[in-house]
Image: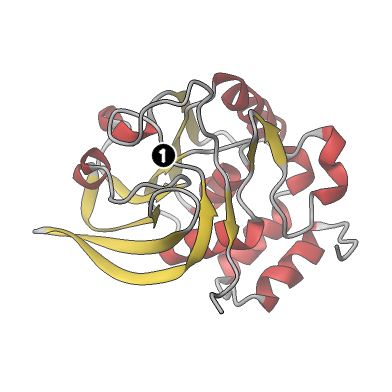
Amino acid sequence: MTGARSPEDLVRTLRAVGIRDERLLRAVRDTPRSGFVPAEHAALAYEDVPVPIGHGQVTTQPSLSAMMIEALGLRGGEHVLEIGGGLGFQTALLARLAADAVSVELLSDVAAQARRNLALQGVRNVDLRVGDGSGGAPDRAPYDAVIVSAAFPEVPPPLAAQMMIGGRLVQPIGPGGREEVVCFRRTESGLARVRVLTAARFVPLRGRYGYPSSGQGDGSTGVVMPPRR
């Protein structure tokens, strides 16, 4: 642990791992992560570590979340879909960087906490829903960008179908446990791989177009994996 205690500490960490998008770094600086973690884990708010959120789940590691958001290439006017919002920190960053966001969270109590966190931080341009994120949110489609914080071997067809041509989607691809986080672009003929961002560990994507429900659900969770030796 570094003893980080402020958003600026987290920004320095993100710069050190290669995040270059100045709008994203400013959003991190202006969005106190301490407002999006449980009080008992407040000391971890500005560390580059996942934080427990209950149900055996943790939030996505900040540097991994920033890497995924940066790959979306947001410029400010986008309509974004987020699958697995956790306690709302990533959601808040998306809301600052895009015109608006629709966030679908499987766990109702986690979503309720996220809704309170976002309200306390004055974030208004988010449509936060409880439900099966593997099916997206077709009533608000099409989306310019989609970010998925749970793993599946392929992109669920509804998510691809709800994207604008030219839009980007970032998702961990794999069975859940060790994945490649991949950036895709929607083309006229379907999804095309742009690049692999990193190896990471995520929970499985649950739902009709993912894995069968475990009974507990899966919140947003992800951590960067070290290189294979």
Instruction: Examine the rendered structure and indicate whether residue 35 appears above or below residue 194.
Output: above
Q: Position of residue 214 (x, y in %)?
A: 46, 26
**Secondary element type, mark 1:** loop
Q: Is residue 73 visible?
A: no
Residue at the outermost front position: 229
Where 190 sits versus 104, above or below? below
**Does residue 215 lie above or below 161 as drawn?**
above
**Nearest the camera: 139 or 17?**
17
Residue 166 pos. (x, y %)? 23, 61
Please tell me in which quadrant of the rendered image residue 141 appears. Answer: top left
Q: Residue at x 39, y 49 (%)?
A: 175
Q: Amino acid at mark 1?
A: Leu
Q: Which residue does the numbered mark 1 point to in the structure image?
A: 205
- Residue drawn at (75%, 39%) of the image: 37
Q: Quadrant of the N terminus?
A: bottom right
| x then y, percent, for residue 4 | 86, 61
For residue 117, above or below residue 172: above
Name the outermost residue toward the left.
189
The residue positioned 79% from the left and 55% from the top of the image is: 46
User: What colouring does the structure picture have?
Assistant: secondary structure
> From this viewpoint, is residue 90 visible?
yes
> Which x, y percent locates residue 14?
67, 69
Residue 214 relative to residue 3: left or right: left
Tally of numbered tags: 1
Is the residue marked by circle 1 packed among few (<14), some (14-19), or many (20+) residues within 10 Å? many
